[in-house]
Amino acid sequence: MAQVHLKNVVKKYGSLEVVHAINLDIEDGEFVVLVGPSGCGKSTTLRMIAGLEDISGGDIEIGDRVVNDLAPRDRNISMVFQNYALYPHMTVQENLGFSLKIAKFSQSEIDAAVQNAAEILSLTDLMDRKPGALSGGQRQRVAMGRAIVRHPDVFLFDEPLSNLDAKLRTQMRVEIKKLHQKVKSTIVYVTHDQIEAMTLADRIVIMRDGHIEQIGTPLDVFEHPVNTFVASFIGSPPMNFLEAQIDGGKIILQDGTALTMPAGYAANEGQKVTFGVRADNIMPQNHAMPAGNNMALVEMEVSLTEPLGTETLLFAELAGSEVQAKMLNPRPVQNGERLTFEISLDKCHIFDAQTGNALKAQ
Amino acid sequence: MKRFKMPPWLVLLLPAIIILSAVVLIPLVLSLYSSFTPYKLTRPESLYKWIGTFNYEKALGDTKFWAAFGRTILLLTIALNLEMLCGLGLALMVSKVTRGQRALRTAMMFPMMFSPILVGFQFKFIFNDNVGLVNNALQSLGITDMAIPWLVDGKLAMFAIIFAEMWTSTSVFAILILAGLFAIPQDPLEAAKVDGCTPIQSFRFVTLPFLMPFIYIAMAIRSLDVARAYDIVQIMTNGGPARRTELLWTLIGRTGYVDAKMGYANAMGYISIFLAIFFTIYFFRKLTAARAELGMGV
Amino acid sequence: MMQSVSAQNRKRIAKTAHFVGLFIAMSIICIPGLWIVLNSFRPTVEIMAKPPVWIPNELNLDHYRAMFGGAGEGGVPVLTYFRNSMIISITSTVIALLVGMGGGYAFARYHFKGKSAIFVGLMVTRAVPGVALSLPLFIIFARLGIIDTHFGIILAYVAMNVPFTIWLIDGFMRQIPKELAEAAEIDGCTRWQAFWRVEFPVARSGIASAGIFAFLTSWNEYALASQLSRSTTSKTMPVGLLDFTSEFTLNWGGMCALAVLMILPALVLTFLVQKHLIAGLTFGGVKG
Ligand SMILES: Nc1ncnc2c1ncn2[C@@H]1O[C@H](COP(=O)(O)OP(=O)(O)O)[C@@H](O)[C@H]1O
Ligand SMILES: [Mg+2]
């Protein structure tokens, strides 16, 4: 078990810098998820922690050791790869025991540890098979088993679920969470899927273009995104954005609709802003919107509906932009129907139109 | 003090680089040097006499050289193109076979395991005017009662050589093209069918472009050892009769070893080396381009 | 109705043409080899008979007996040649494989400046025609006193085989995801261990076929060997084949028997690797 610290870590490929001086402190036993669009440098960061990539600047510490120049084998970490990277010429048993064999443990110790890992991941019936004869989900479990036999300080996962179908993915997500509760090691987990990030993480690290945009608990980043990028990346459907301007302390949308400032935000008079609101906070009147004291009413024409069962997504136009709204306890809605919607302003966000940064009150 | 550390890839490549330098590069430098001397095996001291580009001028002014040069280019062009076409045809035929295809593929590789020198002897035997298979068959079938002088007549000998050369190398093309045919994704072919392409059109516009990288690999592999034809020709005719099948390589061998004029032979050797390198780089280029076009990675 | 009949006819014609074409092609491929094998069992008189004897009256092992007897027709020391061929081919193959594994691994796993230039550079050395290379090599080897030794020919063959071995092994290594070695490194291996314990076993069959290819090339090579060997101490079988010729006559039967002896090992080895060989060439070349 160990803490992990990244201090001004930089990665360059030749003259191309792909990770820009990032800082990250990971607590002992914490489950941290790096999330961001593909190509933003998540894998590179993870692989630098693993020692598979040299770091071009800064320091990485695992435990209290600076590991910058240590080979992967000296860092006491284990890693689960996106394509699992199981050794095709070894049986499941041998795959699981390989690291201990390299470390010259006795055969009886290896057998005990492998047996233990196999039980945790219900692999005991598959021990004599080769990876080629396993299903995707089974391979995934073997890859995890190979990671846990050694009781490493830190587990690294690089998109371990992205090769599975949707149903299996949900199932394995639960297993990974259970596994973490069982082994209590530090976990650094990379994914591009924000739902995976939200459901698994103690803390989420949102990355873009080699920068860290925000670090926080899942609820924190959902409720208090620091900029429009985080706001649109976290949460589904993505947050609605409307261009607006501050006038007389109010938010004036492009069609002149005036909305009061949400709590906790402050903006200058005349400032151009982006008004952000999630579908969850725009609902047809009388449809179970929790009562709030800062509500606005707008009338919109529904152009398209997406029934999802327990809720229905409604597409409508507000102040010249398309917005998505949500209807709980749905009733059938016709396209073209005009409805009155409630906007829960206290759940809304104001961002600077230029920089995209949230305009938090000091 | 910081010690210079070689990058690992260089360490790994070093043995290859050293061996190739020692056995190929250094000799080539030597031969380049000696091509500027009148070096004769029998007169070692002649290695130190510099005569400039005399040998090259002599070669370029020598009709025997140009005849061999032209013949070599002609042979390569005809043989490579025919091999490609025959290989394509053979691969298409074999790919359409449903039963016993494995056996056919195995039989197709048969000529590849023959040493070129063996191929030379084999066809020298088969085209022998007295006891050869071809003449025996023609005579027994009553098509002719003459002994056709396959290896004695200039034109016929050239034909026999091209035939032998094709026999050994067509299968290289056939096998690689066959591998390409199996790797073709079915979707574009089906899309072409839906779009109303005739079989010939879908071959022309879907199959063939996809096969091109495979054809270029075969070409690249072949260009690496086109000079194997030397062995075949050496045995079948040894450049004869009266130099009518003389190729660059047989001419070099004769000049160097029989006439012992090493300097002159090396000058001609250099010309043949440039020819080979030109072919090789040309096909590697083509291969890279064809690959990039199909988006097969770098 | 009429149309379907003509369509059916067309189909039948196409089918027949396909069969005939394939039959002719396969005959051309197979008959020359079979002809050699057949003649190795026929007495010389029958080979030379005029008019030709099509249905053999007599098949015997005379040529083989003479060949292995050594002293027989012309006294060609076939067994010595066979031994030379074996020693030279096997040794040069093993060395070429080791060198080729290093090079192939470097090309498959490392990025570096001028990679494709170096790659083509190595390949080009293979394109140097044997005769052209044999001239300066002969001069140098003569100076070093390694003409007519196993060592000299082995050295030349290693150099001849390395480029192609690198090409094939590069292709095979690329097929192996690099995560496999990375996983091994995380599991506690050094890079060296990761190679021998994981990548090598996975690429084993591919590497073996690269080896067999190198073996066949050495086994069959003539242009270099004919200049670098002088006597029975180093002559290989392809060079030995010439012993059956003299100024005016050719011992066809004996030569056919030696040919069969040369083909047999090649035949067996080729069958063993044909599958990997095609995969190696195409992966190395196309996906490379
Ligand atoms: N070996 C490499 N050479 C050059 N650029 C690379 C290399 N590996 C990754 N990159 C670049 O670094 C960036 C980050 O990649 P990566 O960390 O794999 O992103 P992801 O967040 O999708 O895991 C990408 O833009 C990628 O193109
Ligand atoms: Mg990634």
Image (spheres, helix red, strand yellow):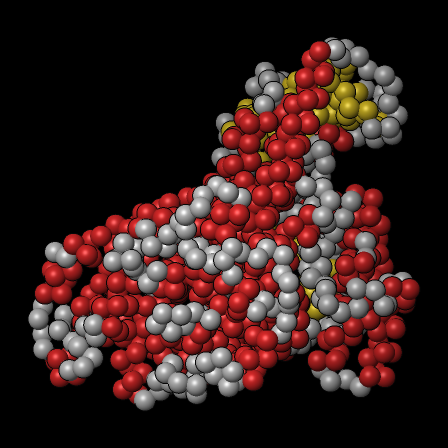
* x 9%, y 77%: residue: B49
| Nearer-the-camera pick, C76 or A159 | C76
- Quarter-of-image position of residue C233: bottom left
> Looking at the picture, how far across and down is residue A85, in whole percent?
69, 62
* x 79%, y 64%: residue: A130
**Residue projecting furthest to the front:** C51
What quarter of the picture does the C terminus of chain A occupy? Answer: top right
* x 63%, y 25%: residue: B193
Q: Is residue B232 visible?
A: yes
| Nearer-the-camera pick, B198 or A339 | B198
Left or right: A244 with respect to A303?
left
| Nearer-the-camera pick, A201 or C174 | C174
| Nearer-the-camera pick, A170 or A187 | A170
Q: How many marks?
A: 0
* x 86%, y 67%: residue: A127
What quarter of the picture does the N terminus of chain A occupy? Answer: bottom right
Q: Is residue C210 visible?
A: no
> Looking at the picture, how far across and down is residue A180, in whole percent?
81, 62
> Looking at the picture, how far across and down is residue A281, in whole percent?
75, 30
Left or right: A145 with respect to A361?
right
> Looking at the picture, how far across and down is residue C158, in whole percent?
45, 75
Q: Name above or below for residue B266 compared with residue C20.
A: below
Q: Name above or below for residue A16 compared with residue B187.
A: below
